[in-house]
Amino acid sequence: GPGGGAPLENANPLIYRRSGERPVTAREEDDELPDSIDDREIFDILPGGEGRAGPRADGRAGAAAQGWAVELRSAFLNPAHLIRSINDPEHPLTLEELNVVEQVRVKVNDAESTVAVEFTPTIPHCSMATLIGLSIKVKLIRSLPERFKLDVHITPGTHASEHAVNKQLADKERVAAALENSHLLEVVNQCLSARS
Amino acid sequence: GLGRGLGRGRGLSPRVGTILLSPGPGWSCRAVLDEGHQRTVRRVAWSPCGSYLASASFDATTCIWKKQEDGFECVTTLEGHENEVKSVAWAPSGTLLATCSRDKSVWVWEVDEEEEYECVSVLNSHTQDVKHVVWHPNQELLASASYDDTVKLYHEEEDDWVCCATLEGHESTVWSVAFDRSGERLASCSDDKTVRIWRQYKPGNDEGVVCSGTDPTWKCICNLSGYHTRTIYDVAWCHLTGALATACGDDAIRVFEESASSDPQQPTFSLAAHNSPDWAVTLHCSASVLRTSVEAEPSRKKRPRVSFSRHMSLMARAVFPVSFLE
């Protein structure tokens, strides 16, 4: 983590069990039927992409025909799945294992194009809360179609400075400016990189 | 003109700090100013005389560009802010300039006939990031909007610039402010999803509003809430028709008109009538990230939706300046 030799704030975090992969349903395997994006729905977005290639069931041209370059790589990643494997900045564990993110605290409304994520820092004075929130936001920005409006905030009552942290995360100008800082961007990218 | 800056998007070449002068179809690009800034250009402003362009950047500087025969030349770079400059505005007189920054300060600059710029005041009244500055239409009065949820006003008192009023009421970041044509009223828009209208009451006013000393008091006389579903980033007040326009994070532009029977002390605004054939104001909106331009026509829909070009940076979703074509 970024702290180097500094003592960890929360040296003995509770570790939660990882949820397994979601079983694929018959509807999802049918290429002719569109997949909506719900809070457990699965998609994997590459640069400039959205949704599934191919015609929608209602005959209208899908996202692909509207000019969005679409590639669907693998099956089924939903916003909860996208963020669960984000690494904690301090521990060799994922946010899911630390229960910082939970599927039940991810709310997706595909029709309204909104995604709301509540995350729970492991301790109320966690100084990494902003960084964790930023990592979640960046992961979603990079993965989801542009039409989605994102709300990332701290689970109410779980952090001493939740208002201040939430306000920073909600300010898109502050987020954009912060990510122009190469050092901070590097730390975020480390949180988002897959660990072997 | 537009400001353009690109953050670190995937697969994008890092052409940061570029200014393009070309708002869209039917216009041709006259100049590309890519030598002035090293980071996102947040705002650009033409001087009242039209010969100069000021650009405010996240690189903590403000460049002043002068129009030449064959393009634009950077005649000076204003330095001093500690971090991202968020806004720049010229006073109507053309001799004063204001800038504001995430460093919480507002700077007032004076320019003389020799094009020499001098900082005449550093105002540290806000307690957080300052998002926007705007000048009064006919007085040397400056307004600023901040992450600290307030609007502040400044003027010169005995050769010193001071904060003469603080407008409190918004429950979150104030992103922008706009004066009406007379300058008697100010509109502010916020992350709290409301637009508030404030009115100036001078000492000895007929309405009996208490003022302390010789400074006018500003009171909130109208609160437009329930219309916007996300942060309101910009507000513009048409000096021709009195209409208000807002740019909102829910992808909609809204136009409000003041009711004919509106009481000046308690005005009422409503969303513009969409089926009115006389409503001929065309809004030109330009995104600050890429050269996206939209024309919004009055719509029959309750919540008119304007879709913007999809060529927007993934990292920095556009903050939309909105202004009326006069």
Image (cartoon, rainbow, N blue to C red):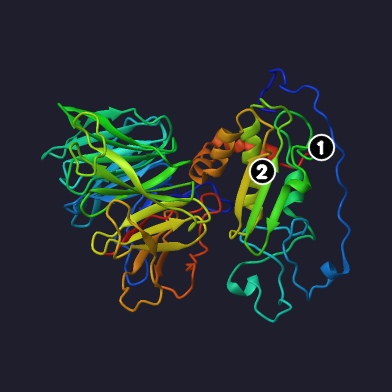
Q: Amino acid at mark 2?
A: Ile
**The C terminus of chain A - image quarter:** top right
Disc assigned to residue A136 = 2
Q: Earlier in the sequence, mark 1 or mark 2?
A: 1
Chain letter belonging to callout 1: A
Which structural element holds mark 2?
helix
Q: Is residue B315 left or right of residue A47?
A: left
Q: Could you tell me how many numbered marks the image carries?
A: 2
Would you place residue B112 above or below residue A116 in this image?
above
Q: Residue at x 62, y 60 (%)?
A: A113
Would you place residue B141 above or below residue A148 in this image?
above
* Few, some or many residues within 10 Å of mark 1 (<14, 14–19, 20+): many
Q: Residue at x 62, y 75 (%)?
A: A65
Residue B274 appears in the figure: yes
* Residue that sits furthest to the left in the current view: B113
Q: x and y percent of residue A127 in the render?
A: 64, 27
Q: Which residue is under mark 1?
A: A97
Q: Amino acid at mark 1?
A: Glu
Q: x and y percent of residue B291 in the render?
A: 41, 60
Q: Nearer the viewer, residue B314 or A161?
A: A161
Res B106 → quadrant:
top left
